[in-house]
Image: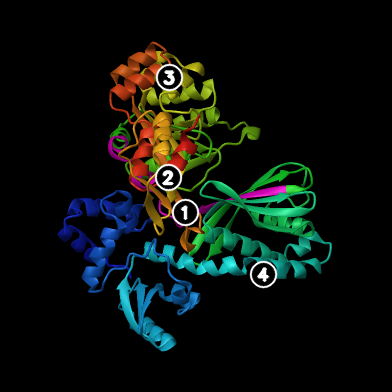
Amino acid sequence: MELAPETLKKILVDSGFVTAEEFDAAAKDAKDFNKDIVNVLVFRNLITEASLGKLAAKHLGFPYALIRNKAIPSKVLDLIPEKVAHSYKLIPFQQEKNELHVAMEDPKDFEAVEFMKRRTGLKIIPYYATAADLTKALGQYKRNIRVEFENIIQENIKKAAKLGKDVAKAAEELPVIKILDTVLEFAIAERASDIHIETTQETLLIRFRVDGVLRDIITLPKGVQPAIIARIKILSSLKLDEHRIPQDGRFKFQAAEEAIALRVSMLPGHFAENAVMRLLPETARPLSLEELGLAKEGLEIVQRNIKQPHGMILSTGPTGSGKTTTLYSILTILNTTAVKIVTVEDPVEYGIRRVSQIQINPKAGLTFATGLRSILRHDPDIIMVGEIRDNETVEIAIHAALTGHLVLSTLHTNDAPGAIPRLLDMGAEGYLVASTINMVIAQRLVRRICQACVQEYGPSETERKALTVQFGESTTKMKFFRGKGCDECGDSGYKGRVGLFEVLEVDDMIRELAVKRSSADEIRQAAEKRGMVSMVRDGLNKVSAGITTIEEIMRATRE
């Protein structure tokens, strides 16, 4: 149930969370960029989804249900069919004797309440839940696919075996379509970021990457490989008869209420072609800086520096550390009608409304450097360069930052202080680096503890002493947490990921060291004396807060 903007404004302004001016500004941007105003308010950290849910529930006169991380028993879910739950936007979450507690987007929906009463024979107790929480909770219905997954696949493999040798025709037949659709649905239910389809000598292996970790899912007969690969190529508009060179494509998949964009990469292998599909949810709201994992001093530095009219902001870290996601979140904050933003990327991960995004094409001569040089003639205010790889890109980016543009880019270094020597090694002049870089954000990704099964524990004295030696500071007063493992997280103890950050603000002292071409260690020592929180310290803070585990910090921060 969407509250009218006027009602929402009154509720929020009266509560003191938001001023009338802040609400009006958010409403204008929501209209200009075709976004949900609630998402804009949450993204700007004006209010949390939970606080907004409580206020809306109070206004409607119903109790509030926080169901985002609640593991709902299967016997309760089974009381209301999945299609009905999606149709009415509701989910049962608890049964007490003859009462069924149901979270609803519109708890005043009399028709839905009456249907559930007749269906279950129970007294229905309606609660209000936010649309975002309901969407996430409804994913629990997909637990059924975990049980049925292999049966569905095996059943359709038998049918696919009876198809003819015409691969293109087989790829359009129902058994092959069903196999791929089931794999995609299962990947979404498991929150996979990537699907790997790998051809071995005797089988076709399917693997998912979940929270950054690859795991085997199912092994299929090698005989279905040509049809499965052909099906992916057809959806991605790739050449069916090309098996010798890599191919890249895209397609979209609709799962319940969630639209998923898939970026496809085909690669010739020793035995046959392999495919990797990156899953990019289109309906997901961009993460705010706080949701990414930035906190306290680091968050304040980032918020202060992204308001600068010119200069350079760098995000550093290894491949897969979330650098691009961080830059996209910053771009979303900066994206207003008053500025023009142009990006040059490889590849374009997400489409951003009213941002000119350019995909590089080295074969056609469009590199980061040539793209950057061209977009300077399009009168941008803010520029994002996917990656600084060479001297030419460095020089143009620095020139852009010197001539009144705010430039965002990524760099491959292990930490924030290392970014400055890296640019100098690429041929940039020390005085130019010193005068253009505003801030460097280094990061890693670690798995979050599942909040449905988180529990505190105490390491032994031996373990604490070993940790003290490794991290160089006492862990005596630290609290430690881990996930016990439950249905919600697939017994892994983890669900989702969060960033570890190290934010270096370039002040006069750091500029002086850059001009002197000081080492990364010298820059680190100076920065930490001036209050920079190291990535390890940020990780230990997140361990004590019950966000992640000490094992994840050790894994992510080892050199």
Q: Magenta residues?
A: 274-300
Instruction: Choose mark 3 or mark 2, whichever is in front.
Output: 2
- Label 3 amino acid? Ala
Question: Which residue extends farthest right?
Answer: 165
Q: Are marks 1 and 4 in contact (CB under 8 Å)?
A: no
Q: Where in the figure is residue 259, as x and y percent of width and height?
A: 51, 60
Please report whichever mark, 4 or 3, sits nearer to the chain's N-terminal start. 4
Q: Callout 3 environment at 10 Å: few (<14), some (14 to 19), or many (20+)?
A: some
Q: Where in the figure is residue 254, as x and y percent of width and height?
A: 54, 63
Magenta stretch encompasses residue 287: yes
Magenta stretch encompasses residue 38: no
Q: Are marks 3 and 1 in contact (CB under 8 Å)?
A: no
| 179 or 341, nearer to the observer | 179
Q: CA distance from mark 3 to mark 1?
A: 36 Å
The residue to which callout 3 is attached is: 520
How many discs appear? 4
Please report whichever mark, 1 or 4, sits nearer to the chain's N-terminal start. 4
Query: Which element type, helix, strand or loop, lies under badge 2?
Result: loop
The residue to which callout 1 is attached is: 493
- Label 1 amino acid? Gly
Q: Are marks 2 and 1 in contact (CB under 8 Å)?
A: yes
The residue to which callout 4 is attached is: 151
Query: Which element type, helix, strand or loop, lies under badge 1?
Result: loop
- Label 2 amino acid? Thr
Q: Is residue 307 above or below residue 434?
A: below
Picture residue at 48% right of the left edge, 21% below the top: 422
Please report whichever mark, 3 or 1, sits nearer to the chain's N-terminal start. 1
